[in-house]
Image: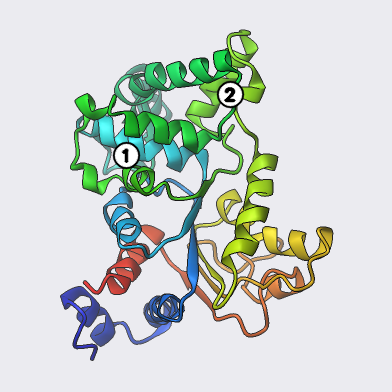
């Protein structure tokens, strides 16, 4: 038993001995070992992890220096801030499995957008952010400046303009923790988000130039600079929460550098873990076993590889608790 660990970790070590539970412990210990040996860690956020309030544990991980870079969907970028400013207006629907098409229509009519059992309030969440982020977009556009999607979000958070709306303890916002640390973030496919759609509408209306927002290709080019600078020694690990573009996009930087940039000495990712309810399947990237990534030049034969086939909203806070010694 780890005597330096807190009660959550002790419970995990005592009870989580087999199957996915054991994989959870192995992955947590692997993450911890990677950091202790001087490695860095990328965490990728797919799905609706921000709406699931993963920020409660993720923000603490960021503040504790256990995460060096994040890749996330545009939805996770904005939904953490929406939860920060509109939490009391969210609506929980525990019987979501029983909803009829009419029930869903009624939610729409009342300006609620449902994510499983949680409804995001359009007016208080989307529109509250829109007027503030629009000003930053417009000012940059007028000045001929260009930034990444997360950089505009960081500017908005650090300006203090949203403090008047805070409805949760700000220490539970991972985006606020990331902004305060200026943590590197890549946001592939940002256009597939509410704020991305809103930005596109201003472009279509001729109010803002599309080039005012830096693109996904520029995110990849930036990551291609960050990775070689940070992959010395123990290297960079890859902790993937869910599947999808949040993980698919950044993991490709290694084979790109090796094959397309002709950098044969570039190190592979030096730890890999995926937490996903996408079971091993046929033709699904999210359901591919980690060894498949060896053939694509992403992982080495010797890279520690873990997969926990379970609900990330349950698994990830437990792994983070272990790493934080809770």
Q: Nearer the viewer, residue 201 or 288?
A: 201
Badge 1 crowding class, 10 Å Cα cut-off, few under 14, some 14 to 19, many 20 or more, is: some
Tell me the quarter of the image containing the C terminus.
Answer: bottom left
**Residue at point 61%, 39% (across, down):** 189
Q: Nearer the viewer, residue 161 or 190?
A: 161
* Residue tagged 1: 118
> Quadrant of the rendered structure where residue 316 is?
bottom left
Which numbered tag is attached to residue 145? 2
Q: Is residue 287 visible?
A: yes
Q: Is residue 17 above or below residue 87?
A: below
From mark 1 to mark 2, how far is it between C-alphas? 37 Å
Q: Position of residue 1 (x, y in %)?
A: 23, 91
In terms of secondary structure, where does tag 2 sit? loop
In terms of secondary structure, where does tag 1 sit? strand
Q: Position of residue 207 (x, y in %)?
A: 58, 9
Q: Is residue 66 above or below residue 70?
A: below
Q: Nearer the viewer, residue 103 or 217?
A: 217
Q: Is residue 143 above or below residue 260?
A: above
Which numbered tag is attached to residue 213? none
**Residue at point 38%, 65% (across, down):** 66
**Residue at point 59%, 14% (across, down):** 208
> Quadrant of the rendered structure where residue 257 is?
bottom right
Q: Position of residue 96 (x, y in %)?
A: 33, 41
**Residue at point 36%, 66% (across, down):** 315
In the picture, measured across the screen, residue 207 lies left or right of residue 239, that is right
> Quadrant of the rendered structure where residue 230 is?
bottom right
**N-terminal of the two: label 1 or label 2?**
1
Q: Nearer the viewer, residue 228 or 218?
A: 228
Q: Is residue 284 visible?
A: no
Q: Position of residue 100 (x, y in %)?
A: 39, 32
């Amino acid at each position: 038993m780890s005597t330096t660990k807190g009660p959550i970790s002790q419970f995990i070590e005592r009870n989580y001995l087999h199957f996915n539970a054991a994989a959870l412990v192995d992955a947590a210990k692997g993450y911890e070992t990677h950091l202790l040996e001087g490695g860095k860690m990328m965490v990728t956020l797919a799905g609706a992890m921000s709406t699931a309030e993963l920020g409660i544990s993720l923000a603490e991980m960021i503040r504790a220096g256990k995460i060096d870079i994040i890749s996330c969907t545009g939805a996770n970028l904005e939904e953490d801030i929406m939860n920060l400013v509109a939490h009391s207006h969210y609506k929980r629907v525990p019987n979501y499995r029983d909803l009829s098409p009419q029930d869903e229509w009624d939610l729409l009519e009342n300006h609620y957008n449902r994510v499983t059992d949680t409804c995001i309030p359009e007016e208080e969440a989307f529109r509250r952010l829109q007027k503030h982020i629009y000003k930053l977009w417009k000012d940059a556009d007028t000045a001929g400046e260009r930034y990444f999607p997360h950089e505009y979000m960081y500017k908005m958070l650090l300006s203090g303009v949203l403090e008047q709306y805070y409805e949760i303890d700000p220490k539970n916002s991972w985006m606020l923790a990331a902004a305060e640390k200026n943590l590197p973030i890549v946001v592939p496919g940002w256009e597939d988000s509410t704020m991305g759609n809103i930005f596109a509408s201003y472009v279509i209306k001729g109010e803002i130039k599309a080039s005012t927002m830096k693109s996904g290709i520029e995110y990849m080019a930036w990551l291609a600079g960050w990775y070689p600078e940070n992959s010395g020694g123990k290297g960079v690990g890859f902790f993937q929460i869910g599947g999808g573009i949040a993980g698919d996009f950044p993991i490709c930087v290694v084979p790109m550098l090796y094959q397309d940039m002709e950098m044969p000495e570039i190190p592979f990712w030096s730890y890999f873990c995926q937490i996903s309810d996408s079971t091993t399947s046929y033709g699904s990237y999210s359901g591919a076993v980690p060894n498949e990534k060896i053939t694509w030049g992403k992982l080495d034969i010797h890279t520690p590889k873990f997969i926990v086939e379970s609900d990330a909203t349950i698994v990830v806070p437990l792994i983070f608790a272990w790493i934080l010694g809770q």
